[in-house]
Image (spheres, helix red, strand yellow):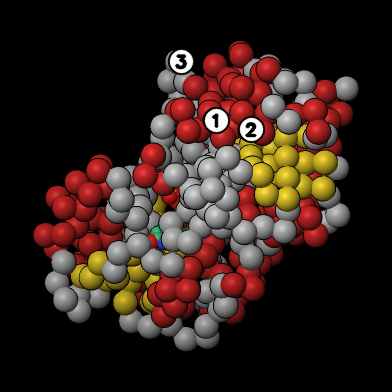
Amino acid sequence: MRIALLAPVWFPVPPTGYGGIEWVVSLLADGLVDAGHEVTLFASGDSRTTAELACIYEIAPSADIGRSQVEIRHALACFERAGEFDVINDHSGPPAAVIAGAVSTPTVHTVHGPLLGEPGDLYEQVARVSPRTRLISISMNQRAPHPDLPWLANVPNALDFSVYPVQPRRGDYLLFLGRMNPEKGAHRAIAVATEAGLPLKIAGKRREPAEQQYFHEFVEPHLREGEIEYLGEVTHGEKVELLQNARATLFPVDWEEPFGLVMIESMACGTPVIATRRGSVPEVVEHGRTGLIVDDYRGMAGAIEAADELDPADLRRAAEERFARSRMVDDYVAAYERAIELAG
Ligand code: UDP
């Protein structure tokens, strides 16, 4: 198949620091090439891929994140070449899904964020303006506000397990890895660590003004050397070391988490996840095998001892069974074939 993959433009593919979607697109692009497909990846020029790279921006315009002009220019570069592809798989967000309405090449749009579930929701508009566009969810829960949209498949994310080595023994600190915002809940992780009397390492993105503000108000006042530490945004290597040596990864989300790559990264490294029952969590964590799910973050400290019992090798095995690259690539290929068939 001749496949166009449209990545978000804001960070390179794969990302050098923060970036969940970019990791998934990177894995998919290289996996599709390995499976023998002809793949063109539309991403920033500082991306690395075995697919053919097409770029408008030589360097990822991270400082302009969210600027429609940048996003649309990047998407147009893909859609104006639509005739060259059998299928276009867009991972870049709703604006591109609207533009897809102007081309006849079948377009499959992967929804990476949560659906708002309000009237006038962007994806409802996409369904209206771009009726041939089919959608892929990354968890079944993600569809809940709009089960009626043109869903084509549910394809959970995956990892390249070779770059997340498992470690047989765990350390003594709790870990929080993610963006600095109320939904992800670094402040709840602080409350849990304080209640448990355990050290907490916090790593994560704090670039945008809202993230800075949240950090300043809810995280910074609690930092104490050797107890509650903030390490900044971490690279892949740093993140793996942190995950491998943590006693447990806390995932105290309070939003409809669409997937949560951090959870499978932790399992891959042999570290259990203690998570709140929101969004995709029950689809990703196998309670009592790869982690513990609690109804309220206030129950997290009490779950740490049970998490200690979970075997790192078994955690890793469980994650590999469900979140391998090959499964994700096969699922996407099946979805593309179906989209082409539906387009008739
Ligand atoms: N991440 C990272 N360094 C950081 C913070 C996050 O590499 O300092 C990575 C994290 O490991 C994960 C991704 O960024 O791979 C975030 O994806 P996730 O799906 O967990 O959350 P999102 O932010 O997309 O909601």
Describe the element under mark 3 as helix, strand or loop: loop
Give the foreground label among 2 and 3: 2
Describe the element under mark 2 as helix, strand or loop: helix
Say if mark 1 contacts mark 2, CB within 8 Å: yes
* Neighbourhood count class around disc 1 (C-alpha, 10 Å): few under 14, some 14–19, many 20 upward: some
Q: Is residue 207 above or below residue 305?
A: above
Q: Is residue 263 above or below residue 43?
A: below
Is residue 32 visible to the viewer in this orientation of the structure?
Answer: yes
Say if mark 1 contacts mark 3, CB within 8 Å: no
Residue drawn at x 41%, y 32% as measured from the top left: 67
Name the residue tied to disc 2: 77
Q: Residue 120's mark?
A: 3
Front in this rendered view, residue 80 or 259: 80
The residues bearing labels 2 and 3 have C-alpha atoms spaced at a distance of 27 Å
Front in this rendered view, residue 273 or 342: 342
* Residue type marked 1: Arg
